[in-house]
Image (cartoon, helix red, strand yellow):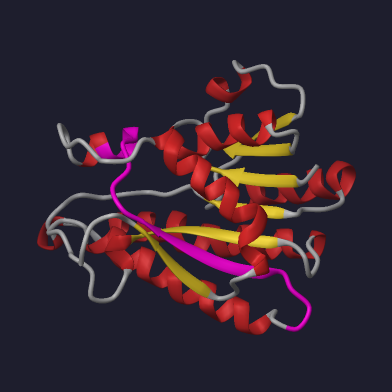
Amino acid sequence: MKHVLITGTSRGIGFEMVKLFSRAGHKVLAISRNLDSVKALNLENVTTISCDITLEEDLKKIENLLQLYWKKVDVLINNAGAILNKPFKDASIAEFKQVYNTNVFGVAGLIKITLPFMDAASHVVNISSMGGVQGSMKFPGLSAYSSSKGALITLTEMLAEEYKENGPSFNVLALGAVQTEMLEEAFPGYQAPVTAEEMATYIMNFSLTGQKYYNGKLLQVSNSTP
């Protein structure tokens, strides 16, 4: 049984991962601002905590829970994300910061408080996007989102280098289009080739075994080119 911490669990890929890890017998700490959907599952080995990862006081709540009850984290999946679909000229700096606060600074803050509970065998999996990969196809309106996901890729590489002697391992998955509520909100009517449950299954399997083969690596999880 692994101790697995997942962010962004109220819907989409994160919600599906909670179910999959629980069914597989792992202990899950499900983090999101809205707890209703996960609580409704009524899963015994799932703990929920309401948290906005952009707020230091909310991150402190997670730190306290880890200190008092969990004592260890085997897998951290930074799945929470914010998206803005707006032309660059119309996007305010405040909107840019909001995206970065969730996709970069919130991730960094959560990793900081989680590291003391991880060891050399632990695995941090950051969820990025193909839009953040150099040379990939880019889409107008996603300047804040894609650039923040690019920053997350580089952050992952840097942390893997800093902690390569004693762990944990750090890897980042750049996802292609997945049929989630977030995708529907950003691109109404678009049909992605992969379901949230299918991608959740892939991420779960990678998070449990990927650290044996990879560290500091970007893996592109997309069936489209470039």
Visible residue check, residue 215: yes
Q: Is residue 11 left or right of residue 45?
A: left
Quadrant the N terminus occupies: top right
Residue 226 magenta: no
**Which contiguous range is marked in magenta?**
165-183
Visible residue check, residue 48: no
Residue at the image position 43 percent from the left and 38 percent from the top: 198
Q: Is residue 37 above or below residue 205?
A: above
Q: Position of residue 161 (x, y in %)?
A: 62, 84
Judge by depth and name the residue closer to the eye, 161 or 20. Answer: 20
Question: Picture quarter containing residue 49?
Answer: top right
Q: Is residue 4 left or right of residue 200?
A: right
Q: Position of residue 191 (x, y in %)?
A: 20, 35
Q: Position of residue 155 (x, y in %)?
A: 50, 74
Residue 178 magenta: yes
Residue at the image position 41 percent from the left and 36 percent from the top: 196
